Image (cartoon, grey):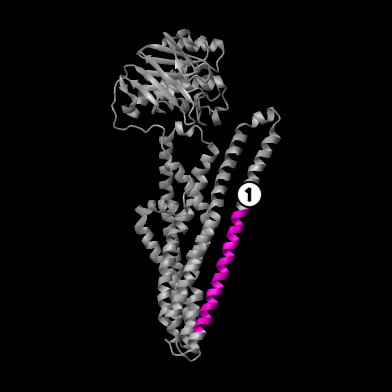
Amino acid sequence: MRRSALTVMGRLIGLVKPMVPVMILAVLMGIAGYLCAIFLTIAGAEGLLVLSGYEGPPFWNILIFMGAAAVLRGILRYAEQASNHYIAFKLLALIRHKVFVKLRTLAPAKLEGKEKGNLISVLTSDIELLEVFYAHTISPVLIAAGTSLIMIGYIGRIHPLLGLWALLAYVTVGIILPVASSKAGGETGLLYRNANGRMNSFFLDSLRGIRESIGFGCGQERLEGINANTDETQALQERLKRHEASNRAATDAAVLVFSLGMLAAGIVLHQSGAVEFPGLVQSVVAMMGSFGPVVALSSLSNNLFLTIASGNRVLDLLDEEPAAEEIENGSRPDYQGAELSRVSFSYEDGEEILSDVSLKIAKNRIIGIHGKSGSGKSTMLKLLMRFWEADSGRVLISNENINGVNTGCLRNMEAYMTQDTYLFNDTLAANIGLAKQGASREEIEAAAGKAQIHDFIMSLPDGYDTKAGELGERLSGGECQRIGLARAFLHNAPLLLLDEPTSNLDSLNEAALLKVLKEERRGRTVVLVSHRRSTMNIADEVMEADTGRIS
């Protein structure tokens, strides 16, 4: 979603509320620090005037003031920067928390189609870039406004026309040029962040498929794809750099023009008798020395191209609605069976997967759902887990609509084994123990024994302390699948949803696993989804799924 820069900044500023006291302190110290730097140069000019014979404060008082201003400038600058970065890092932590909470509500349904590399880019570099906004944008804008108002008053005290010229100068350098530059480069910034996300996704995809690329001799093709993504990102980055250079040149030119303009106006007013010579010197020195805060704003627009684009991408994620909202205050029934009643469902692409499907899952029975790929078997399990909500019809658990059941209670009633078991790069014990918080080693080993994987694990040099590797790369597909089944057994839920639990097993291991399932059915209801006819042999009742219907 493309938002205006003002909308993005408004949303980001809204998060600053808890840090307002620190922000006010940072702004006050920033204004005081800049005034110390500006009046340090003005005091220097005043000292030269005194030495030249013009009336003014004692020379030694001017030197003491300059020394104090120099020391204070350093202290205030440090304190302001420390405060701003404290605010920034606190808010980045808050944003990361909000993003991970949002991911928790979006998972798994809304994350299935997202590119993982692009998502990682949002979670890392995009959020990190917001530090520029919180540490170097909000406070500097307020500091520039406050400092400029004070300097307009100071220069205007010498002569109102000079004050108006200072106002025009600050508005041009601090507002007009940054806004014009932001409009010119904002679209490029968003294109760059999106291109960077695509490059990360392509590179991650290439790393995961490196064996296939080598095996089928298509490594050169993947390399060309990486180079193409890199070239696209680099071209956009060069466009941003050209915007930055143009903006910097325009800012420097404006500073020079307004400084010379102040000198010319001062000379004219001095010749007409409206301004004395010391006032002429003070106004010119004050003008030249006070551009620091507004030039900082102009320079910010260079970084804001990327910051606004990153903020837009983070807000896209935060604004996304989950497929099914979690229910915290719903009912908490005991499991008494489940049912799909005239359920129809389509994914976001609009293709109908289930059409008027009815299915009763009686308690303590093994229900087999057999059918070819794409017939909607897995979708029924996802609806029972309430990862998605049905378009029409009702999904019932214990004779209650699943949309009114507490989500935590529902997850405790169901154990779901997916077709592709994901293993974390952790020990096998930790991967199995994921299904039950605080599970003992004995419970983990018992679950692994039921899943016919205990003997294999014990044959490994480190046993249950063996690392699975990234994406479970150290295990075969069948071994990963049995780890997934061990999780389901350890969860010990009354409703066991198994999606293709034997698809990666040979016939011998399949038979052994099905035997265990039949023996472990006591007190459990099992929904067994498979395209294999042999897997259905242990089912009490077999349903045929075909093109979104059940028979």
Report how many numbered discs are placed on residues in the image.
1
Image position of 113 (left or right of 365): right
Q: Is residue 442 visible?
A: no
Asked which quadrant contains residue 415, the reply is top left
In this view, 406 is above or below 293: above
Give percent across and percent down for residue 461.
Answer: 56, 24
Q: Nearer the viewer, residue 180 or 278?
A: 180
Give percent across and percent down for residue 277.
Answer: 48, 87
Residue 268 is covered by the magenta coloring: no
Q: Assign a secondary structure to mark 1.
A: helix
Q: Amino acid at mark 1?
A: Gln
Q: Residue at x 30, y 20 (%)?
A: 334
Q: Residue at x 55, y 18 (%)?
A: 504
Give percent across and percent down for residue 545.
Answer: 47, 15
In this view, 245 is above or below 378: below
| Dominant secondary structure (helix, strand or loop) of the stretch shown in magenta | helix
Q: Which residue in the protein does label 1 denote?
A: 234
Give percent across and percent down for residue 478.
Answer: 55, 19
Q: Residue at x 41, y 21 (%)?
A: 490
> In what quadrant of the picture does the C terminus appear?
top left
What span is in magenta?
238-266
Q: Is residue 337 visible?
A: yes
